[in-house]
Amino acid sequence: MRDSPSALAGPGFWPQTDPMDMTLIDWIGVAGSLIIAGAYLAVSQAWVDPRAPRFHLLNLIGALMILASLWYRPNAGAILIEVLWVTIALIGLINWLRRG
């Protein structure tokens, strides 16, 4: 038990395994992850141009949804990657606007 993940993470910290225990904000984070993964799939399959605003907007929305969930269940590494994802999406949108 001493080396189990829940013992290492501390009480109440280990992610839920029962979807019924998830809160609305947890589901918002899950939806954000699916949006980002869907946008990446769309680009990797050439369904969407990676320079198109739709791609960057999907990434921005997904990252903001994940950040909202992280507000209630903070994790430094996850927060950092989502802040970087928001920054990259904003740079992509700014570049698209400049290309006009």
Image (cartoon, rainbow, N blue to C red):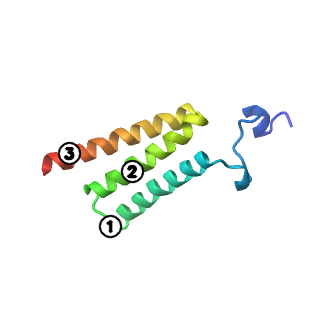
Tell me residue 55's x, y (percent): 33, 56
**Relative to 7, 53 lies left or right:** left
Tell me residue 12's x, y (percent): 75, 36
Residue located beneath label 2 in the image: 59
Specify few, some or many for label 1: CA neighbours under 10 Å numbering under 14, 14-19, or 20 or more.
few
Looking at the picture, does residue 47 appear above or below residue 12? below
Tell me residue 43's x, y (percent): 35, 61
Instruction: Work out whether mark 3 precedes mark 2 in sequence or the reverse, and give the earlier one.
Output: 2
Q: Which residue type carries mark 2?
A: Asn
**Relative to 7, 90 lies left or right:** left
Task: Tell me how far mark 1 sits from mark 3, CA to CA.
Answer: 20 Å
Looking at the picture, does residue 55 appear above or below residue 3? below
Label 1 secondary element: loop
Residue that appears at 40% across and 37% down: 84
Residue located beneath label 1 in the image: 46
Residue that appears at 31% across and 57% down: 54
Task: Tell me how far mark 1 sits from mark 2, CA to CA.
Answer: 16 Å
Residue located beneath label 3 in the image: 95
Instruction: Work out whether mark 1 precedes mark 3 in sequence or the reverse, and give the earlier one.
Output: 1
Label 2 secondary element: helix
**Relative to 49, 2 lies left or right:** right
Looking at the picture, does residue 76 appear above or below residue 14? above
Q: Which residue type carries mark 1?
A: Ala
Residue that appears at 65% across and 47% down: 23
As rendered, which of 3 and 79 lies closer to the eye?
Answer: 79
Instruction: Assess whether mark 2 and mark 3 are in contact (beta carbons under 8 angstroms).
Output: no
